């Protein structure tokens, strides 16, 4: 379950340690944005305690022809699985590399508190 108090991850999606030796943490809109990005990066069935979270990347995208509409639909569903996400405003797929099997983009979300969040995928 995603919370509004979560460890901050770096660009390699690894934990960050502060100068005081403690984990850097995120709260509020930053935590929501990271939680949405995390939900979209995870493979369905890959989270030990939350098998139903994430995207079925193996079934839907890997080894398949790129289907933009299906990808956007899966990203939307994953983003709205985060507790604080209320409505998805926009999904922008900036690049899809078949050779590297990478997707890059951003999602614009309205939170239940009425704040605008941007999650980078």
Image: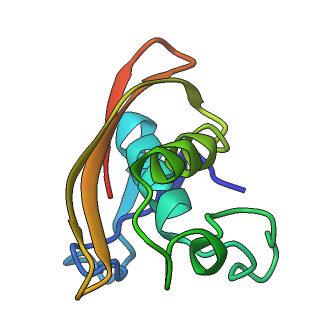
Q: Nearer the viewer, residue 112 or 102?
A: 102
Query: Quarter holding the C terminus?
Result: bottom left
How far from the left and from the top, in percent, is residue 33?
39, 44
Is 10 placed above or below 90 here? below
Task: Compare residues 72 and 46 and report the one nearer the observer.
Answer: 72
In the image, what residue occupies the spot 71% across and 78% down?
Answer: 47
Q: Position of residue 114 (x, y in %)?
A: 46, 11
Q: Quadrant of residue 58?
A: bottom right
Which residue occupies the foreground of this view, 22 or 10? 10
Question: In which quadrant is the N terminus drawn?
Answer: bottom right
> What residue is drawn where x is 57% and y is 51%?
74
Tell me the colour scheme of the image: rainbow
Q: Residue at (54%, 40%) from the top-left corner?
A: 76
Q: Is residue 82 left or right of residue 61?
A: right
Q: Position of residue 101 (x, y in %)?
A: 32, 82
Does 82 sit left or right of 119 as displayed?
Answer: right
């Amino acid at each position: 379950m995603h919370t509004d108090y979560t460890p901050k991850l770096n660009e390699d999606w690894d934990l960050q340690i502060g100068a005081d030796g403690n984990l850097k943490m995120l709260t509020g809109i930053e935590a929501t944005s990271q939680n949405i990005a995390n939900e979209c990066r995870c493979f369905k069935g890959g989270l030990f305690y939350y098998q139903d979270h994430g995207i079925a990347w193996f079934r839907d995208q890997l080894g398949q022809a790129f289907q933009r509409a299906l990808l956007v639909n899966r990203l939307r569903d994953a983003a709205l699985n985060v507790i604080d996400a209320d409505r998805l405003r926009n999904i922008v797929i900036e690049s899809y590399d078949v050779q590297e099997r990478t997707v890059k983009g951003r999602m614009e979300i309205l939170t239940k508190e009425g704040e605008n969040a941007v999650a980078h995928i």
